[in-house]
Amino acid sequence: MQKLDRYVLRNFFEPFLICLSGFIAIWLIIDFSDNNNDFIQGHASLKTIAAFYLTQLPATILLSLPIGLLLAILFSLSSMSRRNEIISMLTAGRSVTRVLLPLFGVGLLTSGLCLWLNWEMAPHAEGIRKTAMKQIKRGRKTGSVETVSGHVFRDRQNCRTWYVRKLRPGSDELNTVHITQQNSAGDITRKYYAESAVFDSAAKTWTLQRGMIVDFDATGDIGTTDYFPEGTRTIADWTETPWRIASSQLDAGGLSVPELQAYLEFNADFPAIQLAPYSTNLADRFAWPLTCFLVVLIAAPLGIVFNRRGVLGGVATALVLFVCLLLSRYLFLAFGKGDRITPALAPWLPDIAAFVIGLVLLWFRSTSRALPRFRRMKIAAPKPA
């Protein structure tokens, strides 16, 4: 890395860290003021409050990085342009692309950071937030886990229906389970009743504790019955897992990348309209992190100006394009979740458009061409009769 690269990065990182920490601080103040009464009523300690906001930090950083990059790049490059430092670099033989190369590297690194956050921690933040707030309001520790009661899960691939009286998301044990096995024609062939069912993730087996197994013949009458009021029965050929059973009640927006992939794999027989939100969110897990690089690609050419009058226009154009990128992203996400656009493609369409716009802006700036301006249309006054 050369001295000029370090100089460009030094001018960028100072406003970037200020913007990023400023957005996080503003969010913290606003959120704390909204939840202050709940913290007081729940007698939450400082440790509990700190742990709560620590779980929300990945999602906040994920949303703050693009706007922080945008403002920092516009500020640093416009400041260097006003001091004629960009012109000095260009007259020294460097191209515009070479001057901006360190910033493009920052865009790629922040995109990688966003992908890491968006893989699991950021999607889980909203679910953790709802559960933690319920526990704080009830005066419970945030480490305790909420339970799901009266849950029904249908495994269409294996023709099994599960009824679980109580389960804890993340636990390998289900309490009071009734399992109905059917054949391909829909006839009931066997029923399982157990006080609890425990899943062994290493052996991939289910252990039913204190219950019975009832077989039915072809006419629907009870055949054999296996009672085990104090014993257990181990079943090794079931593909269901506790997470898969609980995931049917989970929101697609709160699932991580492995969880979304598992949901789509195990529930491939669901209707396309039902799987569309999960496919769209899976694609968005990879499309959203690219926003950081696209912000750099769009803002960097607009941040370089060769006259004072062009600073305001470049900043305004960059902000308008950024807002349009965000609005179009939410619009196409809605189309994808509604299966109006191919779910795997919907989150990428705004990124593709932003990438093309960024390349065009970079080409204009690299070739020293004036950026296109949009002028208001003048309507001629009607001539007097």
Image (tube, rainbow, N blue to C red):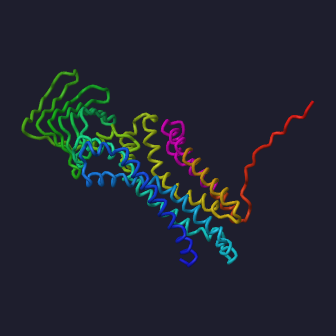
Question: From the viewer's perspective, is residue 136 above or below residue 22?
Answer: above
* Occupied quadrant, residue 236: top left
* Occupied quadrant, residue 208: top left
| Nearer to the camera, 277 or 145 | 145
Q: Which residues are magenta?
A: 328-357
Quarter of the image where the C terminus is located: top right
Residue 238 as seen in the image, left or right of residue 248 = left
Asked if the stretch drawn in magenta spans residue 354, the answer is yes
Residue 50 in the image, given as x and y percentages of width and height: 30, 54
Q: Residue at x 31, y 26 (%)?
A: 185
Q: Residue at x 71, y 64 (%)?
A: 307
Whether residue 356 is visible here, answered yes or no, is no
Q: Residue at x 57, y 62 (%)?
A: 73
| Nearer to the camera, 178 or 53 | 53
Whether residue 273 is visible here, answered yes or no, is yes
Residue 188 as seen in the image, left or right of residue 227 = right
